[in-house]
Structures are given as structure tokens and as C-alpha cells.
Image: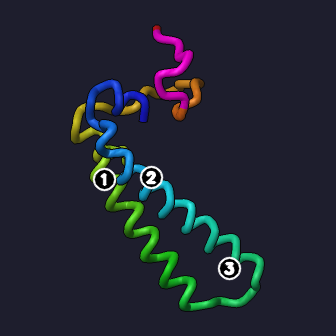
């Protein structure tokens, strides 16, 4: 995400949508945990998880958070970057 911010692809105005993406991904994981621990297949939870995954995919594509959408905007993420990608604008080392 820092590269997308630096290139102006994600701006302060996009933060709400990026937060929604994070919420959707978090919901997917929470539901996965519930499904694993319950031992039962709850179709209502499965449908909710599917909807959250769809939402996360759509938001990822919209904000350049997927490999395909990053390539589309010409901002492929650097490989081998050991920096914390969430440390936006704070004490980041630049090559």
C-alpha cells in the first residue's frame, strides 16, 4: 500500500474504502475461525463469508490492492520488501 500512496493511487479520500476492504477481510477470517471451531457446516455463515470475500475482492480491485489491479495501474509492488507495508510515511527507509 505505501507504493500506491506514494504514486497517488490511494489518497486520503480513499481511506474509507480501504477500511471497508480491511473489515471485509477481517470478517472472512472471523467466520473461518467460527466454522473451524464449531465442527458443523453453517450454511448461513458460509453464505456470509462468500459475500464478504466478494466484497473484499471488489474493493481490492478498485483500490489497486490485488496483483492484477496493481499491474493495471503500473504500480506493481516491490518484491522482497522486508519493511512493514503499514508503516506509511513513518521512518521508512528508501533505496
On screen, residue 80 above or below 61: above
Residue 36, image x, y percentages = 72, 76
Residue 19, image x, y percentages = 44, 52
Select label 2 or label 3 by which is in front. 2
* Residue 6 left/right relative to 26: left
What residue is disc 1 on?
61
* Residue drawn 58% across the image and 29% down it: 84
Q: Could you say whether the residue bearing mark 3 is in a helix, strand or loop?
A: helix
* Quadrant housing residue 28: bottom right
Q: CA distance from mark 3 to mark 1?
A: 27 Å
* Residue drawn 43% across the image and 26% down it: 78
* Quadrant housing residue 44: bottom right
Residue 63, image x, y percentages = 31, 47
Split into 4 quadrants, where in the image is the N terminus?
top left
Does the CB distance between marks 3 and 1 fall below 8 Å?
Answer: no
What residue is disc 3 on?
35
What residue is disc 2 on?
19
Q: Residues within 10 Å of mark 2 (few under 14, many from 20)?
A: few
- Boundaries of the magenta span: 87-94
The disc, 3 or 1, on the residue closer to the chain's N-terminal end is 3
Q: Could you say whether the residue bearing mark 2 is in a helix, strand or loop?
A: helix
Q: CA distance from mark 2 to mark 3?
A: 24 Å
Q: CA distance from mark 1 to mark 2?
A: 14 Å
Count of marks, rendered view: 3
Query: In this view of the protein, which residue sits in the foreground, 66 or 86?
Result: 86
Q: How is the image coloured?
A: rainbow
* Residue 33 left/right relative to 94: right
Select label 1 or label 2 by which is in front. 2
Q: Is residue 70 magenta?
A: no
On screen, residue 59 above or below 12: below
Query: In this view of the protein, which residue sits in the foreground, 12 or 84?
Result: 12
Amino acid at each position: 500500500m505505501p507504493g500506491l500512496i506514494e504514486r497517488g493511487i490511494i489518497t486520503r479520500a480513499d481511506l474509507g474504502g480501504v477500511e471497508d476492504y480491511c473489515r471485509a477481510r477481517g470478517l472472512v477470517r472471523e467466520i473461518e475461525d467460527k466454522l473451524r471451531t464449531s465442527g458443523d457446516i453453517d450454511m448461513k455463515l458460509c453464505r456470509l463469508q462468500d459475500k464478504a470475500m466478494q466484497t473484499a475482492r471488489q474493493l481490492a480491485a478498485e483500490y489497486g490492492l490485488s496483483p492484477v489491479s496493481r499491474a493495471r495501474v503500473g504500480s506493481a509492488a516491490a518484491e522482497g520488501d522486508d519493511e512493514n507495508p503499514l508503516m506509511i510515511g513513518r521512518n521508512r527507509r528508501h533505496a
